[in-house]
Amino acid sequence: MNDFSALSHLECSRTGTRQDADVVAGLSPTGAPLLVRYDLDHVRATVDRDALAARPADLWRYHEVLPVRGPAHVTTLGEGWTPLLPAARYGAAISVPGLMIKDEGALPTASFKARGAAVGVSRARELGVGGIAMPSNGNAGAAWALYAARAGLASMIMMPVGAPDVCRREAVAAGADVVLVDGLINDAGRLVRERMAAEPERFAGWQDVSTLREPYRIEGKKTMGYEIAEQLGWRLPEVIVYPAGGGVGLIGIHKALQELVMLGWVEGPLPRLVAVQAAGCAPIVAAYEAGLDHAEPVEVTPSVAFGINVPTALGDRLMLTAVRETGGTAVAVGDADLLAEERAVTAAEGLFVCPEGGACLAAVRRLRADGWLDGSERVVVLNTGSGLIYPETVDYRLPLVDRDGRPAGEGSSASAGSASMGR
Ligand SMILES: *Cc1c(COP(=O)(O)O)cnc(C)c1O
């Protein structure tokens, strides 16, 4: 251990068995995700939470509870410390006056995938990894390709053809080897593993960094939890609402909250954590409602909220634990509702949210109408990306005029935008 990181070891999330953190790691021997553990007693004794305020406004301000041992290995594009914005007008309209939106669209690459990529790539570089390979619904692939470029690592990204075009272009621009897959993210994940196994020489020294197949992405995303606590003056909100795909952010926020209590930086109870999914792909909601501790495969109709189209997640048990242990819930939202909410909040607050953020806001509206929220809570919604990544989710029909201002062109209007799949 050194003063920069209190990293201690890795732990199997199912059995608690420990393993060495200083060699490249995938899943635990039981096939479960690994969790990163720190010497929190040492951090508690040596770090004054109030002194954090003087540190740089990025996620590395929490470096003692991040896994990178050497500051020289930190790969950064200035990620973290996103605004936590009151949404008073919109909150009043849905009778949740304590509503706040943490705007992750302000991060490099315009989605919160930058957090996981920054920490994951930094740690991979520190451990001597030469290249990274992963499947992605778009945002993760773009972020990891860019951070890999920043770190001088090679990358291969396999994306479903339905993933946002801009993410594909970002990854190509970053020099990644990008492969489009006529399928969903789990098909892409299988193909990554097959390709790496089939070409051992080409991929020697590479790491498969698929969601939860490496332990450090959670650590990057958990910084959302640290930031929410610090931004609220170390007084936790009552509810946090999160759009759950692979679940890394939800698992990370839960882990952060537990660490914060162990550090003595906050007091419980923990916020109730709400997992929001799209109705067309809601395995965690189905498992929650059925009282299961794991998710079963479901029929999938891909949602326009592309980041949460994840039919099978390695983190299913951890997500369900996070929701149940905190007294939270799981909610499925249809595409029409999440698109309407995307428009409504953008118009009310001037914040162009992504459809995944729209899904969370639709869930808040419903939970208030059902009485699950009583209207007195401080509710934090994670807007996990910018609406700019998904321009086609905004339909328009606009007047078109010629240079003299007279109706021009066919039907004298221009229209665009279709949130339907298969673009
Ligand atoms: C990836 C993604 C999600 C889901 O994140 P997980 O950590 O996989 O649960 C939500 N929103 C957006 C915009 C994403 O890109």
Image (cartoon, grey):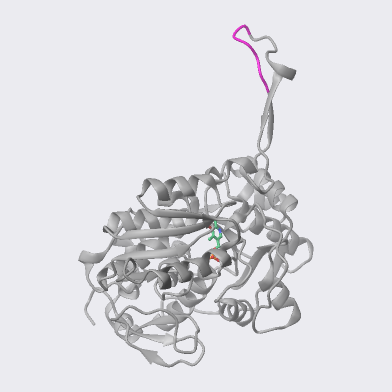
What range is drawn magenta here? 399-404
- Dividing the picture into quadrants, the one containing residue 260 is bottom left
Q: Quadrant of the image for the C terminus?
A: top right
Residue 281 falls left or right of residue 315: right
Residue, x 49% and y 45% (percent of image)?
166
The picture places residue 167, in percent across and down from the top left corner, at 48, 49
Residue 221 falls left or right of residue 4: right
Of all residues, the one furthest to the top in this rendering is 404
Q: Identify which residue, 285 or 414, lies in the foreground.
A: 414
Q: Classify the position of ligand 1 by quadrant: top left, top right, bottom left or bottom right.
A: bottom right
Q: Identify which residue, 302 or 6, lies in the foreground.
A: 302
Q: Is residue 255 magenta?
A: no
Can residue 346 be seen?
A: yes
Residue 169 falls left or right of residue 23: right
The picture places residue 351, in percent across and down from the top left corner, at 56, 44
- Dividing the picture into quadrants, the one containing residue 50 is bottom left
Q: Quadrant of the image for the N terminus?
A: bottom left
The picture places residue 56, in percent across and down from the top left corner, at 30, 58
- Dividing the picture into quadrants, the one containing residue 126 is bottom left
Residue, x 37% and y 67% (percent of image)?
120
The picture places residue 93, in percent across and down from the top left corner, at 71, 49
Q: Is residue 196 above or below residue 349?
A: below
Q: Is residue 19 above or below residue 24?
A: below
Of all residues, the one furthest to the right in this rendering is 370
Q: Is residue 400 magenta?
A: yes
Q: Is residue 82 above or below residue 265?
A: above
Residue, x 58% and y 78% (percent of image)?
322
Residue, x 72% and y 64% (percent of image)?
332
